[in-house]
Amino acid sequence: MAEDRFTVGVVAIKRKLKSAWVSHAWAPLAVLPAAPAATPWTLLSREGEDETWYAGPAEVTLHSGETAHYRDNLSVERPSLWVALRPTAGEELDVALVTADPYEGEALAESADLLVEAVPMPPDIVERVAAFFAAHHVERPFFKRKRDRAGTGGGPRPPVPEEGEP
C-alpha cells in the first residue's frame, strides 16, 4: 500500500471567554504547508484578548486505500484538513493528529478528549493530495451482498421450542 508522508505546521487560537467557569478556549485555526523553524508554542500574534500560537509540527500521512475519501474532500468548495489537539495538564496542548481524510476527521470529532476542527487546506497541500489521488486511485465497484437463506427450503424458520417442550 503506497503512502505519502509530509510535515505541516499547526496554528491554534486561544480565545478569552466571558464565563464564570472557564477563562479561555483553544481551537485549531490553520495549517501551514511546512513546519516553520519556530519552537512549538511560540506566540504569533495578539489581537485584543485573542492570541494566535504556533502549536507545533504534525505529520500528515496519505494512504492509497483512502483515495476515495480524499476525492470526496477535494470535490467540495473548500477542501479541509482536520486538526486534533489534545489538552494536557499544563496550559499548552499536544498536536494529536492532522488528516486529509474527512471520515477520519469526523470520527475524531466524536472523541471527548480531543479538540477537533476542520481548517482550510493550503493550496500546496491541495495539489499534493490531488496528485496522490491521481497516481493511486483505483475505482472499486460496489457489490451488494445477498443475504444467505436460513434454511434449505427458503421458507420461514421453524418455531423455537419453549423450555420443557420436546
Image (cartoon, helix red, strand yellow):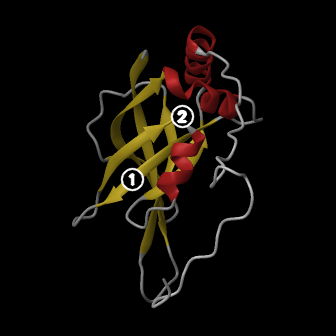
* Residue shown at the point (36%, 28%) measured from the top left: 36
Q: Secondary structure at mark 1?
A: strand
User: Which numbered dot is residue 100?
Assistant: 2
Q: Secondary structure at mark 2?
A: loop
Q: Is residue 102 left or right of residue 8?
A: right
* Residue shown at the point (34%, 46%) measured from the top left: 95
Q: Nearer the viewer, residue 46 or 23?
A: 23
User: Which numbered dot is residue 85?
Assistant: 1
Against 21, residue 115 (above or below) is above
Q: Is residue 128 left or right of residue 42?
A: right
Residue 34 lies in quadrant: top left
Q: Nearer the viewer, residue 22 or 5?
A: 5
* Residue shown at the point (42%, 18%) measured from the top left: 3
Q: What's the CA distance linking mark 1 and mark 2?
A: 15 Å
Against 65, residue 127 (above or below) is above
Look at label 1 and name its amino acid: Leu
Coordinates of residue 37 in the picture (x, y in percent) = 30, 27
Q: Does residue 45 show up?
A: no
* Residue shown at the point (42%, 80%) measured from the top left: 22
Q: Are there few (<14), some (14-19), or many (20+) residues within 10 Å of tag 2?
A: many
Q: Earlier in the sequence, mark 1 or mark 2?
A: 1
